[in-house]
Structures are given as structure tokens and as C-alpha cells.
Image (cartoon, rainbow, N blue to C red):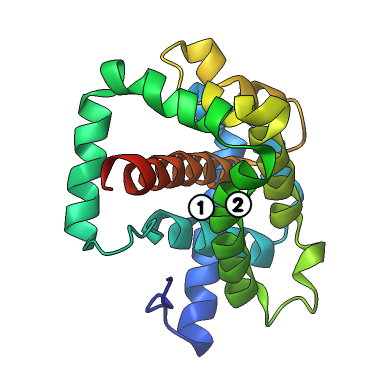
Amino acid sequence: DERRSGDGKGGAAGGKRKGKAGALRGAAAAGGGKKGDQQGGPRELEMSEQELWLIDRTSRALKRMRIKFPGKTDEEADHMLSLLKRNWKTMSSKVGNYWLLKLDGQKRKKIIDIVYQNIRSIIKREWRQQVGDIGHVGLLKILERLFNYLLWSGGQGLWNSFSGNSSKNACWETSFSMENVSKVEMECCRRTVQLCKDCLMVVYLYAVVDK
């Protein structure tokens, strides 16, 4: 579970907030050097410094978030995931069969909900002093649409993100880049997709391999 980051409070925090938000807004205005950096640039220009700062805090919390493997240390879980990824060519069909065929819609949703509920907790923690109802947070609305997409067509949305085909892998990005999604929000989306992939692999290893 996530812990609070050690950011300063009071005037120091306010200075960091403005500095970070200004840097994010400046990068958006410059357009960035990479294709991914250019996505949604104008959106940053419409966002308040406070919103940018809160989304950046949320993004950093998502990067620290880990999917826990029951009965394993983080190091042991990392090792098992690493082995699965290294042998992906031989294991992908087994994981795909488990996700797309063996699990029903309710069980697939439960796996995605592990990530969803943790992200809701992060947003509630980071935004609670600024909003009374996190349901109004724009970032959460974007991520909820993303979760629905990952469950699309019997889980095909998430499975496409495992594809070695870059255009197929990034099809969710193509869909979301057509909307008004900022660079920092897109970073949160990418991390969310990775966490969902990790969660599926952990569940598969626990349910099938480890037993």
C-alpha cells in the first residue's frame, strides 16, 4: 500500500508546487522532443497550477505502487515476474488463455479492480484537501474510461497491450490521444496499464504456476 511521500509543507511545498507546475506547463508549451511528449500539450495550458501539481503527485505515487504477491517478498515477486517476462514467447499463449478464455467477465473485472481500488485510494489521499468528492477529479474520470477500455471485448483491451505489435500495443493511446488528455494525465494512464498487466501476471503466477 502507498505511503505519503516526504514532500515539504507550508511555504516550501507551495514553492515546489508552483515550480513543478510551471515546469510542466513550460514543457507543454515547448511541445517536447518526443511524440509521446507532444500528446495533449495544450491541455496543460488550460489547467491550474494546483491541478498540475496534484496530478504530478499522483503520477509519482503510481510509479511507487507495486502489485503484491501473496506470501512473497517484493524481491521474490520481482524475480518471478522477471522470469515470466523473459520467457514471454513461450508463456504468452498460456497467460492469454487464462485471461481471455478461462476467466469469466466477473473474474477479469476483479483483477482490474485490484488496481482500480488502489488508484482510487491514492487519488483520495492526494486530492482530499482540495476536493470534497473525488468523483469530480478529471484524472479519475479518464482512468475509469481506461479501465472500461481494458475490459472491452472480454478483456481484449488489456491483452492488446501485451502485443509485440507496436500499433496494436498502443491502440488505447491512439484512442485517448484523440481526446483532450494532457501529457501528465497520459503518463498516469501508461503507468495504470502497466500496473494492470503486472496484476494479471501476478494473479496468473499465483493461481497457476505457484500452486
Splitting the image into 4 quarters, where does residue 114 fall? bottom right
Image: 137 above or below 108: below
Mark 1–mark 2 contact, CB under 8 Å?
Answer: no
Q: How many marks?
A: 2
Residue 145 position, x and y percent, is 74, 42
**Residue positioned 72% across, 49% down in the render:** 144
Q: Quadrant of the N terminus?
A: bottom left
From the viewer's perspective, is 98 left or right of 82? right
Mark 1 vs mark 2, CA separation in Å:
38 Å
Front disc: 1 or 2: 2
Residue 110 is marked as 2
Q: Secondary structure at mark 1?
A: helix
In front of the other: 114 or 174? 114
Splitting the image into 4 quarters, where does residue 85 fall? top left
Q: Amino acid at mark 1?
A: Ala
Q: Amino acid at mark 2?
A: Lys
**Residue positioned 61% across, 38% down in the render:** 29
According to the picture, the residue beneath numbered tag 1 turns out to be 23
From this viewpoint, is residue 127 visible? Answer: yes
Residue 105 position, x and y percent, is 68, 39
